[in-house]
Amino acid sequence: DTAVSQTPKYLVTQMGNDKSIKCEQNLGHDTMYWYKQDSKKFLKIMFSYNNKELIINETVPNRFSPKSPDKAHLNLHINSLELGDSAVYFCASSQGGGAVTGELFFGEGSRLTVL
Amino acid sequence: AQSVSQHNHHVILSEAASLELGCNYSYGGTVNLFWYVQYPGQHLQLLLKYFSGDPLVKGIKGFEAEFIKSKFSFNLRKPSVQWSDTAEYFCAVNAGRDDKIIFGKGTRLHILP
């Protein structure tokens, strides 16, 4: 059983398209995150949701819109894709967030390539 | 704002060598500190963490890290590395006031058999 699962694992698309990445966790955690890992492996937090509520929203373009239909799911929709959006996007979850346990459980990542 | 610096981008060692990966953070208050590891083709996983108490923290697979508050450092160590330790290592910090865990840029460790 995969604890944090993301789909798709690989996504190749043209500039200007809109795409979504889905994330689901079966750990019963109340907090979920999206991180972006660029080509230099730099992991940067994008969003965090706690019980379907947006908690952290870093300086991310409006083209990125997270949606959490329930606490087990956090999807990421990206409009008008740009070359610079090419990266690996990691979903993660935790119980109580960084301030409580500090342990994030990561998905395997979704590699997005924008042509 | 919190930030994390990892000084070594790429480290190459032979098996049985000792390892120390540097990590410094910038935040003056109480912090929680972590090391995560990403083995080739796998997802990130927690190696060890420091919240409070003994500044020398033991993790999985023989790793340890020492929190030195005066130096704002949390270096990762292992006395004798193995080929299977080849991976990317990320230091991370949480300032304790919010859920943000900020990651360093990672250190790629390559162990020669």
Image (cartoon, rainbow, N blue to C red):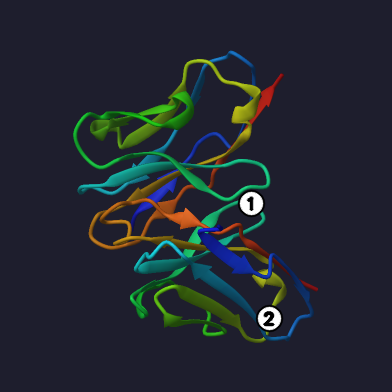
Does residue A111 appear to the left or right of B68 in the view shown? Answer: right
Residue drawn at x 80%, y 73% is A115
Residue B54 placed where, x, y %? 22, 29
Q: Chain of mark 2?
A: A
Q: Secondary structure at mark 2?
A: loop
Residue B3 placed where, x, y %? 39, 51
Residue drawn at x 42%, y 61% is A27
Residue B61 placed where, x, y %? 48, 28
Residue A90 placed where, x, y %? 56, 62
Q: Secondary structure at mark 1?
A: loop
- Residue B62 is marked as none
Residue under label 1, please give it: A40
Circle 1: is it few (<14), some (14-19), or many (20+) Cα within 10 Å? few
Please state which amino acid type lies under the numbered disc 1.
Answer: Lys
Choose between B86 and A9: the one closer to the eye.
A9
Please determine whether, in this image, residue A24 is positioned above or below residue B60.
Answer: below
Please state which amino acid type lies under the numbered disc 2.
Answer: Leu
Q: Is residue A60 visible?
A: no
Q: Are the residues flagged by discs 1 and 2 in contact, CB closer than 8 Å?
A: no
User: For the view shown, which residue lies furthest in the top direction?
Assistant: B16
Q: Quadrant of residue B24?
A: top left
Does residue B106 appear to the left or right of A113 in the view shown? Answer: left
Q: Chain of mark 1?
A: A
Residue under label 2, please give it: A81
User: For the view shown, which residue lies furthest in the front direction?
Assistant: A1
